Amino acid sequence: MLNVVVADDQALVRDGLCMILSSQPDITVVAEAADGVEAVAAARAHHPDVVLMDVRMPNLDGIGATREISACSPGTRVLVLTTFDLDEYVYDALRAGASGFLLKDMHRTELVAAVRTVAAGESLLAPTVTRRLIADVLRNRSVETQPVQLAALTPRELDTLRQVARGLSNAEIAAALFVTEHTVKTHVSSVLTKLGLRDRVQAVVAAYESGLVRPSQL
C-alpha cells in the first residue's frame, strides 16, 4: 500500500486528486495540505511514500516545501504539479529534490501511473515534454564549467549519463550504446554513487549544470 500526501491550495483540485488516488486499491491518501507548511508537517508526521506537491501555495511554496521534505524525510518522493505557464519553476523543483513533475492537464491514468513510478524509486523523466521543459529553463541559465567530480566517471559512464539526460529508459540506452540492459543499470548506479546523487532526476540536472549535455543537443 502506497501512502500519499496531496498538497494543493485549491480545495476543488485537491479533492479531485484525492478522489482519483483513493479509488486505487494500492494507494491511500494519508493527509491533505493547503499550503507548503502543512505539506512539510504532514510529511514529518506520516513519512509518506509520495507527496503530490503544487508549486504555487501560500505561506511556503512548493519549491521550499520540497526542499524541507527532502531534508526531513529522505525516503519520501516529491512529485510536483505544474502548468505550462510555470516552466520557470521546474528546474528549481528538481534542484530542491523533486523526483519529477506532472502537468495539471494530465489524464487520471497518468497521475496514478506517475505516483506508482516515483514510489518505486524511479524518476518521471521519460516524456518528451519533460526534456523540453528542462531544456527551455536551462537555456536561460548560465552553464557552469564541468565540475571536477565528473572526472571520476569512466568514458562509458559519461556516455550513459548523456543518454540519461536525454530522458532515455535503460532499454533505450542499452540499444543506443550496444550493451545489455543489466550493464546500463550497473553504469547508472555507478554514476549516482560516484556523483553522490539520489536518482536519475538529479543526474539529469548534474549533466546540464556541468555542461556535459546542452539543450541544443536534444
Image (cartoon, rainbow, N blue to C red):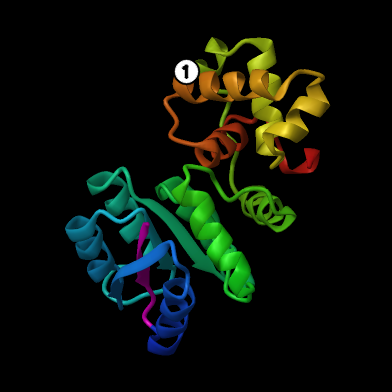
Determine the main secondary structure of the stretch shown in magenta.
strand
Q: Give above or below for 127 relative to 27.
A: above
* Residue 187: % across, % down: 60, 19
Residue 61 appears in view: no
User: Amino acid type of disc 1?
Assistant: Lys
Q: Residues within 10 Å of mark 1 (few under 14, many from 20)?
A: some
Q: Give above or below for 172 relative to 145.
A: below
Look at 62% across and 48% down and name the residue there: 125
* Residue 16: % across, % down: 47, 83
Look at 54% across and 46% down and name the residue there: 123
The residue segment tinted magenta is 1-9
Q: Give above or below for 139 relative to 145.
A: below
Residue position for label 1: 194
* Residue 48: % across, % down: 30, 56
* Residue 101: % across, % down: 54, 59
Magenta-colored stretch includes residue 68: no
Residue 39, image quadrant: bottom left
Magenta-colored stretch includes residue 4: yes
Q: Residue reaching furthest front?
A: 25
Apparent side of residue 157 relative to residue 99 in the rendered image (left or right) = right
Q: Nearer the viewer, residue 126 or 161?
A: 126
Look at 52% across and 23% down and name the residue there: 189
Q: Nearer the viewer, residue 89 or 49?
A: 49
Look at 50% across and 38% down and name the residue there: 202
Residue 120 appears in view: yes
Label 1 sits on a secondary structure element that is: helix
